[in-house]
Image: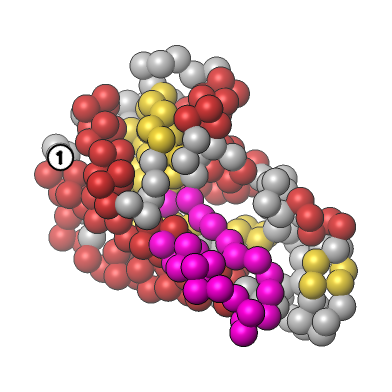
Amino acid sequence: MSGDGKVAMVTGAGSGVGRGTAVALLAEGYSVALAGRREDALQETIAEAGADGARALAVPTDVSNPASVAELFAATVRAFGRLDLLFNNAGAGAPAVNIEELLFEQWQTVVNVNLTGVFLCTQEAFKVMKDQDPMGGRIINNGSISAHTPRPNSAPYTSTKHAVTGLTKSTSLDGRKYNIACGQLDIGNALTPMAARMKDGVLQADGSVKPEPLMDVDNVSRAVVYMASLPPDANVQFLTVMATKMPFVGRG
C-alpha cells in the first residue's frame, strides 16, 4: 500500500469529504491524525475505517485557534513521530442571503475557518516538515469549484476559496526549499450531508431553482489518495473532480 509507514493529517475528519478521505488513507496504510470539532464524530470515522488505535489519532480541534492548531500538530508528532501529508479540508459556510443582509459575524466565521484555519495548519506543517528526517512532505488544500466560479449569495465562501488558491500557490513556492509540495483539489457536487440539498433544487445564477447532479464522495477520497501517492519530485498543482453534468462548465 502506498501509505505504509507514512503519517497523514485530515482536518474536518468527522464528516463528509474529511471522513471519506481519512477512511481511504487508513485503508492505504497511513497513520492518520483526525482533526475536527467533535470527538464523537472523529471516533465514528475511526470506527468506520476499522482502524486500530496505533494508526488513528482523534484530536478535537478548532482550526481557527492558533493554540488549538499547535496542540494538534504536537499531539500528532508525539504519537507518530513525523508528518508526511496534510489535507486542509475543514470548512464552513454562511447562510445564502443577499450580501447586504449578511452579518459581520457570519462573514468572520467563514474567514476564520476556511482561510485562517488553512494558514495556521500550513504554518505548523512547515515547522514539522522542514525539521524532520527525511525533510519535506505534501499539503493538499480543499479548494472547491467556488475557487473559480461563485454561486449566488455565496460571498464569504467564494472569497475564502479564491484566497485558498493564492495560499496554495504561495505554499507551493515557499515550500520548495523544504521539499514541501502543495496542491489543491477543487470539488464540485460531492454527495455529502452539506451538499445533499442540491438534488432537491439549488438557486441558479438566473434566479431559477433547479436540482443538480451529484457524485459519490469516494471520487474525492480517491483523488486525494492519488495526489498523495506521487513521489516527492512530482505534484498535482490543481485538480478538479466534479459531477459530470453539474452546471459549471459553460452556461448551464
Q: Residue 105 colored magenta?
A: yes
**Kind of element beneath mark 1:** loop
Highlighted magenta segment, given as a residue range: 88-112
Residue 57 as seen in the image, left or right of residue 92: left
Which residue is rendered at x = 35% and y = 68% of the image? 167
Inspect this view and state whether residue 236 appears: no
Residue 99 versus residue 43: which sits nearer the camera?
A: 99
Which residue is rendered at x = 87% and y = 78% of the image? 208
Task: Look at label 1 and name its amino acid.
Answer: Gln
Which quarter of the rendering shows the C terminus? bottom right
x, y percent for residue 108: 45, 68
x, y percent for residue 206: 82, 84
Label count reads 1
Q: Residue 141 colored magenta?
A: no
Q: Is residue 49 above or below residue 77?
A: above
Which quarter of the rendering shows the N terminus? top left
x, y percent for residue 147: 53, 72
The residue tagged 1 is: 132
Residue 165 versus residue 179: which sits nearer the camera?
A: 165
Which residue is rendered at x = 86% and y = 72% of the image? 209
